[in-house]
Image (cartoon, helix red, strand yellow):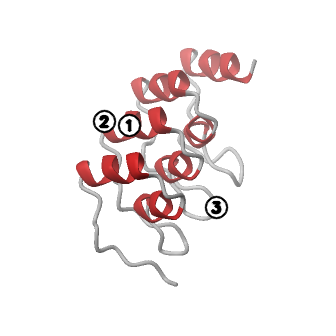
Amino acid sequence: MESKGYALSVQIGCSFTHTVSKEGTALHLASANGNSEIVKLLLYRRCELHAFDSKKRTALIKAVQCQEDECVLTLLEHGTDPDLPDVYGNTALHYAVYNEDKLLAKALLLYGADIEAKNKV
């Protein structure tokens, strides 16, 4: 039911570039929940691709953390920057490696993720 709400709001022109909660924008929520159709719809409607949540995580980082492969690939195909760090200095690649997710790590590297990026730990 939530997905229909997002779709309806986008169709009538509501902006999702502003943070809707401490967890981020609608793109963050759709990416973390693996709702690739909503991710595509939001991107089609030109939502802010590099918006941050309260911990400076992008929708890409959320999708990688939740291991939502299709959402990760969609975001990468639409030009999201894989090297934007969160408040801890972690990039999407750090989280893919932490999760031992070889597929996502490979995809991030193919889309230009910095293999030498350093976090704050």
Tell me the distance, in whole angstroms, between the alpha carbons under discs 3 and 1: 24 Å
The residue shown at (71%, 55%) is 22
Decide if residue 99 is on the left or right side of residue 91: right
Check disc 1 and report the residue beneath it. 73
Q: Nearer the viewer, residue 101 or 88?
A: 101
Mark 3 or mark 1: whose residue is earlier in sequence: 3
Closer to viewer: mark 3 or mark 1 = 1
Give yes or no for contact between labels 3 and 2 (Cβ–Cβ under 8 Å).
no
Residue 57's disc is none
Give yes or no for contact between labels 3 and 1 (Cβ–Cβ under 8 Å).
no
**Three-letter amino acid code of the residue under disc 1:** Leu
Q: Is residue 5 above or below residue 93?
A: above
Tell me the distance, in whole angstroms, between the alpha carbons under discs 1 and 2: 6 Å
Q: Quadrant of the rendered structure where residue 35 is?
A: top right
Q: Secondary structure at mark 1?
A: helix
Decide if residue 97 is on the left or right side of residue 113: right
Tell me the distance, in whole angstroms, between the alpha carbons under discs 3 and 2: 25 Å
Give yes or no for contact between labels 1 and 2 (Cβ–Cβ under 8 Å).
yes
Residue 74 x, y percent position in the rendering: 39, 33
Residue 7 x, y percent position in the rendering: 60, 18
Check disc 3 and report the residue beneath it. 54
Check disc 2 and report the residue beneath it. 77
The residue shown at (55%, 72%) is 87
**Three-letter amino acid code of the residue under disc 2:** Glu
Mark 3 or mark 2: whose residue is earlier in sequence: 3
Residue 16 x, y percent position in the rendering: 57, 36
Quarter that holds the N terminus = top right
* Neighbours of disc 2 within 10 Å: few (<14), some (14-19), many (20+): few
* Neighbours of disc 3 within 10 Å: few (<14), some (14-19), many (20+): few
Q: Secondary structure at mark 3?
A: loop
